[in-house]
Every structure is written in C-alpha cells, then in structure tokens.
Image: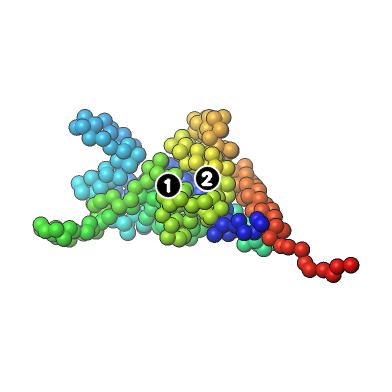
C-alpha cells in the first residue's frame, strides 16, 4: 500500500530561498563598510575586476567570483579596513537598507499556510533561507535575521589555529579578518539547495549521500528561489529542472535590469519576473503568496491520498 511507501521525512515544508545582494537590498551589502572607512566603492570593485587578469599574468588561476574576499583581507592588512572583524561585520549588518516590504513579507508568506486550517492539520509550514555570495555575519546582524531559518554566506577567520607540527607560533594580534573560512560562489549555491533538499541543515546528513526522493526533507518542487539575474542561473536551473519555482527581480524603474531578467524568462530560466518591491498588493508579493498557496494545496492533496490509501475498510457484519 502507498502508506508503506512513505519516506522518512514528512515533506510538509515549503522553502522560500532568497539571494541577497540586489534581491533584498539595493546594490551590494558591503556599501556600509566602504562608507565607514571612506573608501570609494566603485574604485574597490574596479580593483577586484582587474585582479583575475593580473594574477593570470603571474600564472595563477583564481575564482573571479570569490577573489573579492581575498581583496577584503588584503585591504584590511594594509590598514584600509583597519580592524575589520567579524563583530564589525555583524554590526554593519544593522546599517543595511532593504527594499520595500522587507521584512514584512517573510511573516506574510508564512501566514498563507498558518492561517489556513486545511493546511494546519497537515502541519504544513514555510521556511525562509538566504543563500548569498556576501558576508554571512552581515546578514546575521541585519534586521531580517530573526525571520530567516538558515543562512549560507561567506565566512572569515580572524585567528587561524596554529599547527602543532613545530615552528614558531605567531603572536596574537587584534581581531581582524585574516583568512577565508567559507566561500560561496554562484555555482556552489546549488550545494546549499541540495542541503536544504536533503535536510543536511537540520540533520547529520552528508549532502553527497544518496537519498531517495521520498526520504528527502524538502522536495525541490516545494521550493521557490528568488534572485536578481544571470549570475544565479545555476541555482535557477536546479530549481526549475526539478519542478520548483524561480522568480527574477529587478529594481523598480531600471529598464536595463528589467530587460536582463526578461531574457531569463524568455529562455525558460525562471517562471516569473517582478520588481524588487515586496509590499502588499505588488505583483511580486501576490505571485509569491499564490505560489505558496499552490504548493500547500499540492502537499495537502498528497497527504489526503496517502491517508486514504493507508486506511483499510472497517470490519462489518456479513449478511
């Protein structure tokens, strides 16, 4: 019977997965850092863009998407970002300016299921995740932190653990970022999606472990991914290819950005596009709310069928 084929997980959770830069905030999250240290933001990113060619001229291959992390450390060592620490990154998170409707939409999307008795009886819920190539510490320190169920972002180490194999142990200096602890680029964002899918973020499950679809915590078809453009194509592809929903957003009034995400829609990379405005009654707000409802109905219908298939006829008298 179908009842005996049910997986280990309830599969009654909907995951809404957000990019960060240019999706939840206008521009890049590092802006408050540049402002505090009086560093020209444009000049910094121009330097970063030139690094790949300069290192390749030395015969060194670098990841163009994460080399900016190294440059942040270089600038810190040079005193440009003197004293920049994880605590400071956390504090800078409070200075981030979000698009309209943030953080309100996080609770609003959860209410789509929590206020519906047909969904509540099956324990259907909504979880929000941020998967970003930016700094996890800044996201943790921002006003959305309390609304988010999980954060994937880049992490810095301040005081590297010394080797016990010998040699001199460097004297401890002030707390400053000095090494990269964890890096996410646009391709490795897909790893985070699989961790959410398999439940690796909730249980001790290796993301590379082979797990049957019925045993995964959140099926891809119960995921919605929101991001701003072509750099998220790998993540868009994983979501769309596996039956989930993808939405591309653009800043209100930005014709160039709108044309860019419109091409993603035309190419079948995303299911919908909308302005990065999450206020009630906007197209983006309404589409996301509707998709939550559609997925919740699908989950509820599946649960009903599982119950019907698992219940045998009650005993009765034979005439």
Name the side, left or right, on which 12 lies relative to 257: right
Please name the residue shown 58% across and 38% down the image: 271
Q: Is residue 103 visible?
A: no
Residue farthest left in this picture: 167
Eyeballing the image, is 274 above or below 120?
above
Q: Is residue 2 visible?
A: yes
Please name the residue shown 43% across and 42% down the image: 27
Instruction: Estimate how packed mark 2 is, as few (under 14), some (14 to 19) or many (20 or more) residues with alpha carbons within 10 Å.
Output: many
Identify the image's colour scheme: rainbow, by chain, secondary structure or one colour: rainbow
Q: Earlier in the sequence, mark 1 or mark 2?
A: 1
Label 2: which residue? Answer: 225
Please name the residue shown 54% across and 47% down the image: 220
Q: Position of residue 249 (x, y in %)?
A: 53, 40
Label 1: which residue? Answer: 191
For label 1, the SS is helix
Q: Nearer the viewer, mark 1 or mark 2?
A: 1
Instruction: Estimate how packed mark 1 is, as few (under 14), some (14 to 19) or many (20 or more) residues with alpha carbons within 10 Å.
Output: some
Q: Position of residue 204 (x, y in %)?
A: 42, 60
Q: Quadrant of the C terminus?
A: bottom right
Q: Quadrant of the N terminus?
A: bottom right
Eyeballing the image, is 313 above or below 131?
below
Near-viewer residue (1 or 94): 1
- Quadrant in which residue 311 is drawn: bottom right
């Amino acid at each position: 019977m179908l009842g005996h084929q049910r997986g280990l997980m309830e599969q009654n959770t909907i995951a809404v997965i957000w990019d960060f830069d240019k999706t939840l905030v206008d521009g890049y999250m590092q802006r408050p850092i540049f402002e505090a240290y009086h560093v020209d933001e444009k000049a910094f990113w121009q330097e970063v863009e030139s690094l790949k060619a300069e290192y390749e001229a030395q015969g060194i291959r670098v990841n163009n998407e994460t080399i900016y992390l190294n440059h942040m450390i270089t600038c810190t060592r040079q005193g440009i970002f003197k004293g920049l620490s994880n605590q400071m990154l956390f504090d800078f998170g409070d200075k981030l300016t979000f698009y309209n409707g943030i953080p309100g939409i996080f609770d609003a999307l959860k209410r789509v299921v929590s206020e519906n008795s047909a969904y509540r009886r099956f324990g259907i819920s909504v979880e929000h995740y941020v998967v970003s190539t930016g700094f996890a510490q800044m996201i943790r320190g921002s006003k959305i932190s309390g609304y988010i169920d999980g954060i994937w972002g880049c992490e810095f180490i301040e005081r590297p653990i010394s080797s016990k194999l010998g040699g001199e142990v460097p004297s401890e200096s002030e707390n400053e970022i000095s090494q990269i602890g964890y890096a996410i680029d646009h391709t490795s964002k897909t790893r985070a999606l699989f961790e959410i899918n398999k439940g690796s973020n909730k249980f001790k499950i290796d993301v590379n472990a082979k797990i049957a679809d019925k045993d995964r915590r959140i099926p891809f078809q119960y995921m919605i991914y929101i991001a701003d453009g072509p750099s998220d194509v790998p993540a868009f592809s994983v979501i769309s290819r596996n039956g989930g929903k993808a939405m591309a957003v653009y800043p209100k009034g930005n014709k160039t950005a709108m044309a860019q995400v419109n091409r993603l829609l035309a190419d079948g990379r995303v299911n919908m596009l909308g302005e990065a405005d999450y206020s009630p009654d906007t197209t983006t707000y309404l589409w996301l709310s509707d998709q939550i409802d559609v997925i919740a109905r699908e989950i509820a219908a599946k649960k009903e069928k599982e119950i019907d298939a698992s219940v045998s006829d009650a005993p009765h008298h034979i005439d």
